[in-house]
Structures are given as structure tokens and as C-alpha cells.
Image (spheres, coloured by chain):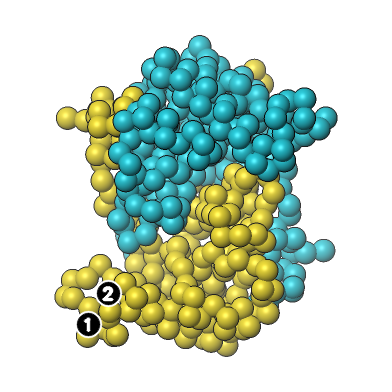
Chain colours: A cyan, B yellow
Amino acid sequence: MAMIRLETPTGLEMSVGEAMFTQRAIRRLDPNRAVSDHHIKLILDAGSKAPNGGNAQPARYLVIQDKEKIKSFGALYHEAWWAKRRDAYGWKGREDMPEGSPYRMAAQLADEMVNAPLVILAFSTGGRFEAMSVLPGIQNMLLAARALGIGSVLTTLHPEVMDRVYALFDVPQQMTFHHCLPFGYPRGRFGPTSRLPTAQTTFWETWGQVPPWAE
Amino acid sequence: MAMIRLETPTGLEMSVGEAMFTQRAIRRLDPNRAVSDHHIKLILDAGSKAPNGGNAQPARYLVIQDKEKIKSFGALYHEAWWAKRRDAYGWKGREDMPEGSPYRMAAQLADEMVNAPLVILAFSTGGRFEAMSVLPGIQNMLLAARALGIGSVLTTLHPEVMDRVYALFDVPQQMTFHHCLPFGYPRGRFGPTSRLPTAQTTFWETWGQVPPWAE
């Protein structure tokens, strides 16, 4: 059977295995190094290729690089991040956060969003149940960025700031906000993540029965 | 800066660009060719590496290869598929489906699910708003399968059959069902998909303003 061989877009030559196994949340971004328009297009093109329900393609993206706009957005992101911690844990500020909390890195991102060189906001033209048509594309974007040496992290906002975010960028009310993705060159490293072994997350033929590779 | 170089898992050498740009829904699966346990593990390992909220890792997978179980599940999938078309369009059967409907291929999958060599059901330990912690992993699984020459398609079920699916596989009630993924070697080809150009799905700095690569 003849397989169609497409040219791989230049820049995405990293193996899919290496991209996946070295993908990690990159929250410390170099504020002084811009992501080129060419790479932004490549990341968005990769996102467009992901599966979506019935090929209706409801995902829409807003690309923000303007420093003043990112500063305004970053202030709203900071407010949203702390509103989520307030709702979930009652924290009002960093002094309420336990020593060694896994949220410390995320809190730093909330501080630093104002300096992100690039933010992409993902919306959809329909309701909030379109996650199935938005998130696979976002994962493609994160993997394409990884292959280009560009870091990112998948984040959300909080209802408290939503009206102001929509107003800041003239987003029509009928659009549904899904995710916020800051992008930039990492100040840290890509590298392995800590995950449960699949032997602990997978069942075989029936619930509770372990896969053959479980010890 | 020294980058950590991890060994790419054997089998996932395809470039991330080729995997993404040739990924497509594969609904016609070879019923006579099994997917090896080694490849199933590789697909699940790839899924585990995707981002998830706060690294809580709520995704759980049920792997089904037993022919009798797949036959029972396939009958429920068929019922669910038509229940969704009934709810959405009032269709009761193939005779109600318009000529040239894009659902014809999906209807064929509904017929053929009983013969799928492998089905993986994705659940989460929490609520249905955990899509953000399940779908990026599913996209990793689909891309890893693509790199291995294994086809799949991202599908759902319908509430009408859910109790019976849970009973068939002894799934605890507190688990939330997310997606159904049949896997197998394709009877057709991988190849390009038809997608909107990103110039039509992307805005620049503010809603309604086109990106630099728009004509």
C-alpha cells in the first residue's frame, strides 16, 4: 500500500517520542527573546491538524505580543490565579501558602505573566463542551513548541476577570474562553516529568485487573 | 545551557511534524491484526506524559482486546452512536441520513466497532470538568499510535448506554467516562486532513485583526 509522504514542516523534525517524553510545563520564560511570527504560525498550524468533533473546527486563537497589552492581561491573570486559590483553599496571598506547596511555581508564573513575550488565548465558537475540539489542538501546539525549543504551560482563568479580558481584546460575547498559553524561550530546562507508571493507571479487560507489564 | 537528552522510546522516532500533519481519523480497522501489548504500553506511556492539571493525574484507562467483550461493547457503541444522531437530527437509521453526509464513515465505524482489535476507554477519577487532564493525554496516545502505524479515532458514547458499559467492565460508579478509542492497523491510509487555514482561525493582538500571514 502506498503511503502518502508529506514533507515535515521545517522545525518539527524532533521525534514524537522525544517531544512527548521531554515536554514539561515551562513557567519561567525569557522576557527578552521574542518568538518569531514564523514559529507562531507553525505552532498554530500544528494545532489546526489535531482531531476535532465532526471537523467543525470551532477553535479560535488570539495571539498577543504587544507589551502593553500583555502587561494589562498579566495583571488580570494574576488576579484570576489568586481568585482560584481563594476559592479552592481560602488563600489570600503568598503568606497563606504552605511551605513546599506545588503551587509556588505557578504563583511565580502569576507574577511573571506581565513579562511573557507571547500569550495565546484559545476560544471556541460554541459552548464549553467543545473541550474535545480544542484541547487536542492545544496539545499539538505545546508539542510543536517543545520541538522548536519554546516553552509553555496550559493554564486557565477565573470567571471574576472574564468580562475584563473580553473587553481588553474586543472578544465577541458569543465566544467561549478555554485556555491561556504563555509562550517563550525557557529560563530553565525541558526534561522528564514525574508521572504514575501506566501499570497503576490502566486496567486490563475489566476494572481492577492489572496490565501484563505490572509487577 | 545543557539540555537533558532522553532516549526516545523505540518506535516513536517519527518526527512530531510528520505525525501531526498525517494524523487523521482511522475508522476502518483490520480486524485480523492485533496490536501488541508492547505497543499498547508505549501508547499509554506516551499518554501519561501529557500535561494535566496540578499533576493530579486523574486519567484512568481500560484496555479491551477480548473478542467477546468487544462484541458486547460494540453493540452498545452502535446503540449509543444512533442515539446521538436521533437526539441531534431525529435520524432513526441509515435511511434518514442525507446522501453524502459526513456521518457515513462514522456510521460505518458504529457498525464495525464489534470487530475492532483493541478498544481503550478513558475515564477520570473526578468530575467531567477534568477534560483538561484527559484530552492532552489522549492526543499523545493518538500521535504515538500514528507513529507506530496504528490508526484510531476519538469518539464518545451516549448516556443511554452508560450503565450497561459500566456493568460490562465492572467500572466503579465514581469514575467519569470520557472517551472511547478503537485502535488497529488501518485498512485505509493515513494522510492529510482538510482544515481551515490558521489565517482564518487566528486573530492578532485584538479580535478581528488578521495575522501577518493572512493574504
Q: Amino acid at mark 1?
A: Asp
| x and y percentages locating residue A121 in the rendered image | 42, 35
In the orientation shown, which residue stands out farthest toward the top?
A32
Depth check: give the residue in front, A74 or B43.
Answer: A74
Depth check: give the residue in front, A123 or A212.
Answer: A123
| Residues at marks 2 and 1 on the same chain | yes
Indicate the secondary structure of the residue bearing disc 1: helix
Residue B162 is at least partly visible in this image = yes
| x and y percentages locating residue A213 in the rendered image | 74, 64
Q: Which residue is mark 2?
A: B89
Q: Which residue is mark 1?
A: B96
Q: Residues within 10 Å of mark 2 (few under 14, many from 20)?
A: few
Q: Is A124 displayed left or right of B90 in the figure?
A: right
Q: Which chain is home to disc 2? A: B
Up-down relation of residue B26 to residue B97 (above or below): above
Measured Cα–Cα span from mark 2 to mark 1: 9 Å
Depth check: give the residue in front, A116 or A177.
Answer: A177
| x and y percentages locating residue A144 in the rendered image | 46, 37
Q: Quadrant of residue A87?
A: top right
Residue at image coords 73%, 54%: A197
Image quadrant for the C terminus of chain A? bottom right
2 and 1 marks in contact (CB < 8 Å): yes
Q: Quadrant of residue A11?
A: top left
Residue at image coords 37%, 26%: A168
Residue at image coords 39%, 42%: A123
